Image: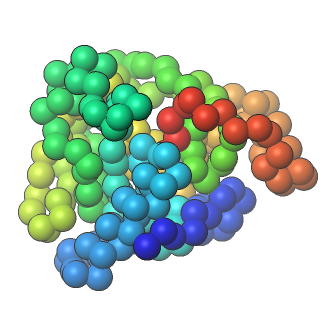
Amino acid sequence: MILKVLTFPDPILRKRAQKVTEVTAKLRRLAENMLETMYASRGIGLAAPQVGESIRLLVLDTRPKDENGQVILEEMTELERAIVQPLVIFNPQIIKSEGKTSFEEGCLSVPTYFETVTRSLLVEAKALNIEGKEIHLVTDGLLAVCLQHEIDHLDGKLFIDRLSLVKSNRIKSKIKKFGYTQEEAESSPAG
Ligand code: ZN
C-alpha cells in the first residue's frame, strides 16, 4: 500500500520519534508499505515520521540501478556492498563517525529542493533488524549519507536545517509562501 508522504512544514516531521520496544507484525507491515512508498516515489530512504508515524523506523535502499533495474555494483563501495539492501531498521543509533563528505541531498518531504549537505564520511551504527535482533552496521558512500539523513528525520530534523542559516531561512520561507512550485529534478536521489 502506498502511503501519503508528509511535506515540510508538517509538524509531525518536527517531533522526536518514539523508540520501538518490540518489532510486531503491525510494524513489519508498516515497513513493507514504507518500502513500497519509497520505491514508488523513486526515493532511496524513508523514515516513519515522513508517513505520519512518529516511531524510530527507517527503510533504505541506496543501490544504484541501471535502466533494467540491475544493481550497478561498480558504483558502490566495498562497505556498501557488504550490507544487504533493502534495509529495514528500528531504533538506529550512530555509535561512531569518521571524516567528512558533501553530497547533494534531496528529501521526499521537501520535494524538488536539492542542496549540498556536509556529513560524516563513515558511520558505525547499531539498530534492530526486522526480526528484532540487534545488528551492527559499518558503512560509507551513499548509504552512510542516507542513513544520517534518515536518522535526522527521527529527531525531527530536515536536511534544510543543515544549510547556512541564510540559505535555510530563504528556502523555508519560500516554501511556506509559495508551496512546492519548483520543477522536478528527476536525476537526484531523495530520502
Ligand atoms: Zn528526507
Can you tell which quarter of the image residue 107 is in? top right
**Which residue is at the far right?**
177
Please state if 160 lies on the left or on the right of 123 as rendered: right
* Residue 188 place in picture, x, y as percent: 55, 31
Can you tell which quarter of the image residue 85 is in? top left
Q: Nearer the viewer, residue 185 or 12?
A: 185
* Residue 157 place in picture, x, y as percent: 55, 50
Please state if 118 lies on the left or on the right of 56 as rendered: right
Q: Quadrant of the N terminus?
A: bottom left
Please state if 30 lies on the left or on the right of 168 as rendered: left
Residue 125, relative to residue 6: is it above or below? above
Q: Nearer the viewer, residue 57 or 45?
A: 45
* Residue 15 place in picture, x, y as percent: 55, 66
* Residue 140 place in picture, x, y as percent: 28, 26
| Residue 143 visible | no
Please state if 21 lies on the left or on the right of 188 as rendered: left
Q: Nearer the viewer, residue 62 or 79?
A: 62
Q: Nearer the viewer, residue 168 or 70?
A: 70
Which residue does the image show at 34% across and 63% down from the upper left?
57
